[in-house]
Image (cartoon, helix red, strand yellow):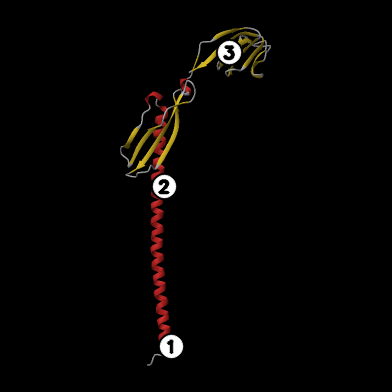
């Protein structure tokens, strides 16, 4: 049987198409494998980053609860039982106010032997925290209608009869007011904050008033 020249050409063309399809299929298989591996690696990386963030938050909470005077830097050290390491860096101390100091605290968490941290948290610590604030000894102001200007930040505490009204204004704004009533016995008190330099005014049936300054 004699094979024509045209048939040979068609066979060669078909073979070429098959080879091209085989090459494309091979390339696509490799690409799919790479994409799958990248997705797996990304999932693992995200999990590691999340764990690092949790360790950073935990270490930051510890540093926040520590007394200001006990703060200290910590060189990169292994976190026992994990693949992570922690590092604490204290920044330069500066003045927040005339009586309060501040300094930044940075917590870094590293994974394995990575040179860059997986998670970083930076926050400020102050030499006087909210729980350290105190009030001074109460100073008697008087009774009845009273006026004054606050030399420092503090509180006015006043009390009067439950049957009579009185109020406390700070810079023209009523912050404390007791309404008299026809029932009940005993004194009713009110306490309002007064910022430094504010004008305060007590009016009405105030039996006694006291000033208590805010101090650190």
Vertical position of residue 87 compared to residue 99: above or below: below
Q: Which label number is shown at residue 6?
A: 1
Q: CA distance from mark 2 to mark 1?
A: 60 Å
What is the secondary structure assignment of the residue under circle 1? helix
Residue at position x 38%, y 52% in the image: 41
Q: Is residue 143 left or right of residue 1?
A: right
Residue at position x 37%, y 34% in the image: 88
Estimate the x, y position of residue 68 in percent, counting from the top left: 41, 25
Q: Nearer the viewer, residue 164 or 36?
A: 36
Q: Secondary structure at mark 2?
A: helix
Residue 19 falls in image quadrant: bottom left
Secondary structure of residue under mark 3: strand
**In front of the other: 141 or 14:** 141
- Which mark identifies residue 172? none
Q: Residues within 10 Å of mark 3 (few under 14, many from 20)?
A: many
Q: Which residue is mark 2?
A: 46
Q: Quadrant of the N terminus?
A: bottom left
């Amino acid at each position: 049987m004699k094979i024509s020249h045209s048939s040979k050409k068609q066979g060669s063309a078909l073979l070429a198409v098959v080879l091209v399809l085989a090459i494309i299929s091979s390339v696509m298989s490799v690409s799919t494998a790479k994409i799958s591996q990248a997705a797996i690696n990304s999932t693992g990386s995200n999990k590691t980053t999340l764990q690092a963030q949790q360790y950073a938050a935990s270490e930051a909470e510890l540093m926040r609860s520590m007394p200001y005077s006990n703060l200290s830097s910590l060189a990169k050290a292994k976190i026992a039982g994990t693949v992570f390491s922690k590092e604490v860096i204290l920044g330069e101390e500066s003045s927040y106010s005339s009586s309060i100091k501040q300094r930044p605290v940075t917590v870094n968490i590293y994974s394995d032997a990575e040179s860059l941290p997986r998670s970083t948290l930076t926050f400020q610590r102050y030499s006087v925290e909210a729980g350290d604030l105190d009030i001074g000894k109460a100073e008697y102001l008087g009774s009845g209608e009273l006026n004054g200007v606050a030399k420092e930040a503090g509180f006015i505490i006043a009390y009067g009869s439950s049957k009579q009204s009185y109020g406390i204004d700070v810079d023209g704004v009523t912050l404390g007011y007791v309404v008299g009533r026809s029932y009940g016995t005993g004194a009713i008190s009110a306490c309002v904050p007064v910022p430094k330099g504010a004008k305060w005014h007590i009016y009405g049936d105030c039996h006694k008033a006291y000033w208590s300054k805010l101090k650190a």
